[in-house]
Amino acid sequence: MNRAPGIIVTEPRGDGCSVARWHAPGLTVRVAWRALRAAFEADAANPSSESVKLFREGRPVVHRMLWPHRDGSSDDPWPWSVAFGSSTYFAWARAVQSFDRPMFEALVEAASAEFSRRGLPSGPAEAEVFLGDYGYTPGGIHREACSNIHLVLSGAKTMHFWSGSAWPSHGTPRRVDIAGGTGTREEYLPDLDPAVALGEARSLTAETGGGFSWAAGTWHVGETHGPTMALNIAAYQRDLDAEPPMPPWGNEFSGEVSADWLAQYRDHVGRDDSAASLLARVSALGMRPARPTRPPCPGQRGRWRLEAPVLWMMVARGSLLVATLGSVRRHESSTTLLDWLAARPRLGTESVVPPELRDLVAWLHEQGVFDVVPERTATAQPDNVEGQ
């Protein structure tokens, strides 16, 4: 059975900002809440991680015992609204894709085409969850060294943007901070009330299924309109100034990668990593992956499950690196393997797995991009069969 892959598309709406339109069945309130909860639980075990924040009435809730009870059986984030009563509250967590494999897979699949269009950043990419009913984002107007794709999962949210060399005016106090986890520069305008500055802003509003995108270094602040949940993809660079991204080697982030392109990417990220590590990083769009939840599964038939990048590169005579979703595997090169990878049929189309590739396919199944069809359920003449 075929399924429509997730996709994110951005459309410019002014200097440095765009609207985002997206469809990703795997990115839901339930999934985002599960990842947020996992991030808070991990932070409780390592309070120095700076990976989560919680504010009530605009003030940080420092003591973990004062956080609302995190019921591991609940898939509903809105009891936090009940716990806080009429108070405004703001919950945030970073790198949430590393806590939840289904979210990670859905993010890479949905964002692949957009990253192919805009290119790869020099720094890492990660997903953040924003939850709450907080009016303006705590901290006020700010800017960071990352471009952002902000998807509204539930509720309604407005993003206000300010641009131009004359804004903010000379002498406006700035507070400089260093982002936890990435070590990149952030700037805040602590004395400037966002409500007072709205006349100079470009404001975009999105509801469930919509969103925004903006360039690194763009001044902005979010504003909720009642309880809201949003998922943000932050792609980091070295500093706040404009930085050229690394364009892909072709029209999309999938297929054969040349050694020359990977050498340019190594210079772009400024890391003397191995070819295997770099290829794995590209296949995850720069994100740190969550661990796979599926065991390897060999089989004679199967179908592609995700439109996520699958990359390969010849590294030595007779040796090939294959990477997907942040993982990499070395395999003996052959015409059969190269033809099979290049011929990748549309999602859901069942095909025969060549015998010499069954170990590789078992690994692709474990990573989540391929579904091996168990022998007991495979039919003699299934629909949409290729390779017979």
Image (cartoon, rainbow, N blue to C red):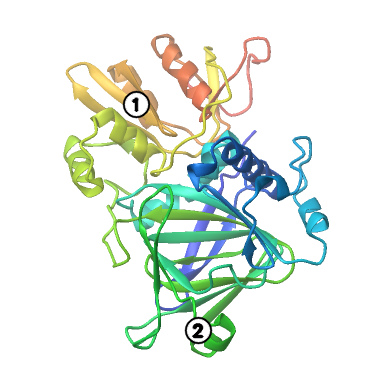
Q: Residue at x 24, y 18 (%)?
A: 319
Q: Is residue 83 above or below residue 43?
A: below
Left or right of 262 on screen, residue 214: right
Residue 155: x %, y % from top left? 71, 64
Q: Earlier in the sequence, mark 1 or mark 2?
A: 2
Q: Amino acid at mark 1?
A: Val
The mark tally for this picture is 2
Q: Nearer the viewer, residue 118 or 196?
A: 196
Q: Nearer the viewer, mark 1 or mark 2?
A: 2
The quadrant of the picture occupied by the N terminus is top right
Left or right of 26 on screen, residue 267: left
Q: Nearer the viewer, residue 84 or 136?
A: 84
Q: Is residue 35 above or below residue 87?
A: above
Left or right of 30 on screen, residue 85: right
Res. 229 in view: no
Residue 350: x %, y % from top left? 56, 25
Mark 1 nearby-residue class (10 Å; few <14, some 14–19, many ≥20):
many
Verify CB contact (< 8 Å) between mark 1 and mark 2.
no
Residue 297: x %, y % from top left? 54, 14
Q: Residue at x 64, y 69 (%)?
A: 157
Q: Quadrant of residue 88?
A: bottom right
Mark 2 nearby-residue class (10 Å; few <14, some 14–19, many ≥20):
some
Res. 20 in view: yes
Q: Residue at x 45, y 12 (%)?
A: 358
Residue 90: x %, y % from top left? 65, 60
Residue position for label 2: 201
Q: State how far apart marks 1 and 2 are (Cα).
A: 46 Å
Left or right of 55 on screen, residue 20: left
- SS of the residue under disc 2: loop
Q: Amino acid at mark 2?
A: Ala
Q: Is residue 245 above or below residue 135?
A: above
Residue position for label 1: 322
